[in-house]
Image (tube, grey):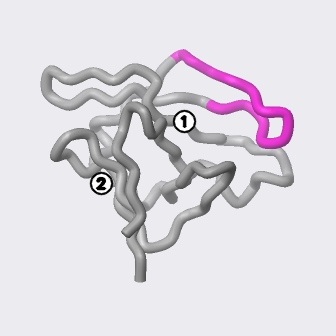
Amino acid sequence: MPTATAKLGDLIIAQADTWETVEGNVYFPPSSIKEQDALVKSYTKSFCPWKGDAEYYTIKHGDTVVPDAAWYYATPYEKATNIKDHIAFYKSKVAVTVE
């Protein structure tokens, strides 16, 4: 069975055997977050016409700070309820793999 993993350097932030994929992004369920303390809520928000309002996390680990590296939909629109509270990571900021 494949596993999805989100890593920042050697830090595994999330790892899951089940996840949702939307528009090429892996959305990790809340229970798969291994380093909750590394995720710090950001003030950044964005809007998707079919998913709704996204909220963001900055990743902090030691001296490393990666602003707005992850996002989630707390109250998604009906077509995106399958990703409610799931967290996705920018692949340009966090290594996301499925193996």
Q: What is the distance, in whole Å, between disc 2 and disc 1 at their CAs? A: 16 Å
Q: Which residue is mark 2?
A: 34
What range is drawn magenta here? 43-54
* Mark seen at residue 23: none
Q: Amino acid at mark 1?
A: Trp
- Give the vertical position of 99 relative to 67 (above or below): below
Q: Are marks 2 and 1 in contact (CB under 8 Å)?
A: no
Say whether residue 35 is left or right of residue 98.
left
- Tell which residue pokes out farthest to the top in this image: 43
* Position of residue 81 measured from the top left corner of the image (x, y, whole percent): 75, 55
Q: Earlier in the sequence, mark 2 or mark 1?
A: 2
Label 2: state its secondary structure. loop
Q: Confirm whether the magenta stretch covers residue 52.
A: yes
Split into 4 quadrants, where in the image is the N terminus?
Answer: bottom left
Please name the residue shown 48% across and 55% down the image.
30
Please name the residue shown 48% across and 36% down the image.
90
Q: Confirm whether the magenta stretch covers residue 25.
A: no
Please name the residue shown 34% across and 45% down the image.
95
Q: Quadrant of residue 8?
A: top left
Q: Quadrant of residue 48?
A: top right
- Say few, some or many: other residues with alpha carbon within 10 Å of mark 2 (under 14 / 14 to 19 / 20 or more): some
Q: Which residue is mark 1?
A: 71
